[in-house]
Image (spheres, rainbow, N blue to C red):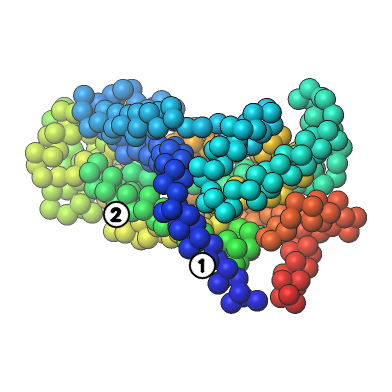
Amino acid sequence: MEGGVHKADKTEFKECFNLTWKQPYILRLAFSAGIGGLLFGYDTGVISGALLYIRDDFKSVDRSTVLQAPGTWRWMLGVAAVPALVQFLLMLSLPESPRWLYRKERKEEAVDILRRIYPAEEVEAEIEALRLSVEAEIAEEGSIGEYSLPGKLRKALSSVAVRRGLVAGILCQVAQQFVGINTVMYYSPTIVQLAGFASNSTALALSLITSGLNALGSIVSIYFVDRAGRRRLLLLSLIGIVTCLALLSGVFFVATKHSPAVSTEETQLFGNYTCPAFNPTSGMEWTCMDCMRATSECGFCAHGGNKLLPGACLQSDSTVRDACHANHREWYTRGCPSNFGWLALIALGAYIVSYSPGMGTVPWIVNSEIYPLRYRGLCGGLAAVANWVSNLIVTQTFLSLTEALGIAPTFLLFCGISAVAFVFIFLLVPETKGLPFEEVEKMLESKDYKAWHGARTQESKDHNT
């Protein structure tokens, strides 16, 4: 059975490639839509690097964990206008969906588009398939009746299959965000600096590794999602995420404990630029982390010979930063010098590798398969809203959490949330691999439904087949 699945997958890829080659019109349609994904990914990733340079140009941004204000960052953000313009021009010539045209009784236009997409020998079969699909869709919608949005929602929630499916779908989408992924995507250079890499350019270059791993993991998921199954990929992904977040938390705990001391002598070398919160005559022993936590207006200038030796706690502005660099020292405003930075980078990379093939892609697949067809649009929309609301909450609180709790406890918090997500997904999300919508609905409305039991039963069926 497994060999047959592999052969079928290879055949599908080959047929897809051949069809695209023979019908260039398909390539144009796919390219027009694909640019949207490129723009989404670029916008998500570029802000993390641009934020480093925005902070340098606008001190109000550097001192706030809530606010994103000549130079490098303008180009980083502005270059996205190029593919956006290309997509706009291509979309001017995009046709309407054949399905939409067919439903609007514009059947000749729908058929004309299908003839431009499919080889001549397949067109009639596709037209018939479209007709049957639209008729079935209209019949399904007829069973719902004419309701307002609240009415449709009440009707949907009256079905046990929809309720169970919605719980699973929203759970996957919320968990996708609350494992902390977009804190990494939006703030990865900042996290790299927190790991002890002070330079903006170094932090940005190292953060590109995480973006590359994320893209690689998405490609890997294409291969595994129909072999391992949705549920198994989610659970394995969460095991990796919990492990990596625990490691990240541990690394930052150790780095904080071993941060370099603040030297009164080193600080006094810079004259009257001492951090306002640091009192050299108080007798208190400060470390770099104490300097960072005291106020957002302070920074740490590392020792010139060895960055792990005691350094200076100074007020943070461009004059002091330039004076620090002029003495061939590193200037830190987020993290502190550490020997554990590379371990943090490895854990960060492993986190991305664990996340992308499972929690990165599978929640969207589950949400496309788990709802009855007549409620798929409504339920899928609700799950998407839950995803973006969770995204907003996580990204708006991350930097505030790192200042209030510290970077290590923040990652430990995400680790705990991920562990809880593992339990709930194990209990509430069934396997939908290879099941038609009708079979999924029957499984969800069964009286003895158990998400983990359903998954084992389906795997047994596949094995016996």
User: On the rendered structure, is 33 left or right of 455?
Assistant: left
For the N terminus, the image quarter is bottom right
Vertical order, 74 against 49 (above or below): above
- How packed is label 1: few (under 14 Cα within 10 Å), some, or many (20 or more)? few
Which residue is drawn at the image coordinates 58% and 32% (left, top)?
109
For the C terminus, the image quarter is bottom right
Vertical order, 425 against 136 (above or below): below
Residue 116 position within the rendered picture, expressed as x and y whole percent measured from the top left: 50, 42
Which residue is drawn at the image coordinates 76% and 25% (left, top)?
149
- How packed is label 2: few (under 14 Cα within 10 Å), some, or many (20 or more)? many
User: On the rendered structure, is 65 left or right of 385?
Assistant: left
The residue beneath circle 1 is 10
* In front of the other: 5 or 416: 5
* In front of the other: 96 or 253: 96
Q: In 3D space, how far apart are the residues under numbered discs 1 and 2 (Cα atoms)?
A: 48 Å
What SS does tag 1 mark?
helix
Work out whether residue 251 can be spotted: no
User: For the residue marked with disc 1, what is the amino acid?
Assistant: Lys
Residue 338, labelled with which disc? 2
Residue 409 position within the rendered picture, expressed as x and y whole percent measured from the top left: 49, 48
Report the residue that reaches farthest toward the right. 447
Residue 377 position within the rendered picture, expressed as x and y whole percent measured from the top left: 69, 36
- Front position among marks 1 and 2: 1
Which residue is drawn at the image coordinates 35% and 32% (left, top)?
86
Looking at the image, how many numbered discs can be counted on the residues? Answer: 2
What SS does tag 2 mark?
loop
